[in-house]
């Protein structure tokens, strides 16, 4: 993907190196991507995220045939995923099952897409496995 603008202080974006350029020293915001004095934040999300509150029980495969079972806090939701706060570090690519507290929705399965430390917890992105209609 590449976009270019021929005006002075033009903006260009290339997927290969995710570079955004603008007028020197001028803070700008492009959609959900923010630039300030050369700092770059890239949002790779393909759908809108909405805040969410609640708790659920998560079962993460431990890679050795076992399961790590823990309560998690739901932080946001989108068409293809969920954001959670989790008390254990989980490696991206780990498979999971997520169960609602109170059965307000059906169990979800998928893989962990990211996991970053946040104080005593970890913020994780969960890619939900979408089931095809029968």
Image (tube, helix red, strand yellow):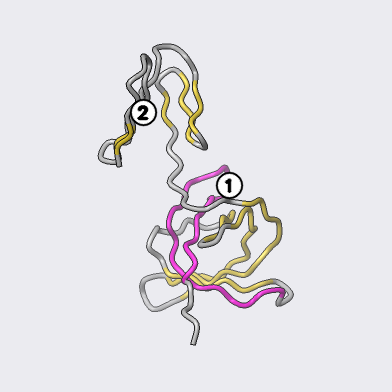
- Magenta stretch: dominant SS? strand
Report whether 54 appears left or right of 14. right
| Distance of label 1 from label 2 (alpha carbons) | 34 Å
Q: Mark 1 points at which residue?
A: 120
- Tag of residue 20: 2
Q: Residue drawn 49% across and 67% down?
A: 128
Image coords of residue 125 (percent x, y): 50, 55
Report whether 99 appears left or right of 101. left
Taking 80 as reference, is 48 above or below it?
above
Which stretch did the figure color magenta? 104-129
Callouts 1 and 2 close, C-beta under 8 Å: no
Image coords of residue 24 (percent x, y): 39, 12
- Tag of residue 101: none
Looking at the picture, tell me which residue is in the foreground, 108 or 11. Answer: 11
Quadrant holding the N terminus: top left
Q: Helix, strand, or loop for circle 1?
A: loop
Q: Residue drawn 68% across and 63% down?
A: 55
Taking 117 as reference, is 38 above or below it?
above
Looking at the picture, tell me which residue is in the foreground, 11 or 113. Answer: 11
Q: Residue drawn 60% across and 57% down?
A: 77
Image coords of residue 69 (percent x, y): 55, 71
């Amino acid at each position: 993907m590449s976009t270019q603008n021929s005006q002075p202080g033009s903006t260009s974006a290339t997927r290969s190196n995710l570079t955004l350029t603008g007028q020197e020293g001028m803070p700008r915001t492009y959609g959900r991507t923010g630039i300030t004095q050369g700092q770059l934040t890239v949002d790779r999300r393909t759908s809108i995220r909405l805040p969410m509150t609640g708790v659920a029980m998560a079962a993460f495969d431990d890679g050795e045939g076992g399961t790590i079972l823990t309560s998690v806090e739901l932080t946001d939701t989108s068409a293809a995923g969920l954001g959670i706060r989790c008390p254990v570090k989980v490696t991206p690519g780990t498979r999971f099952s997520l169960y609602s507290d109170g059965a307000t929705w059906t169990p979800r399965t998928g893989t962990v897409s990211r996991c970053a430390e946040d104080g005593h917890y970890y913020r994780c992105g969960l890619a939900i496995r979408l089931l095809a209609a029968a």
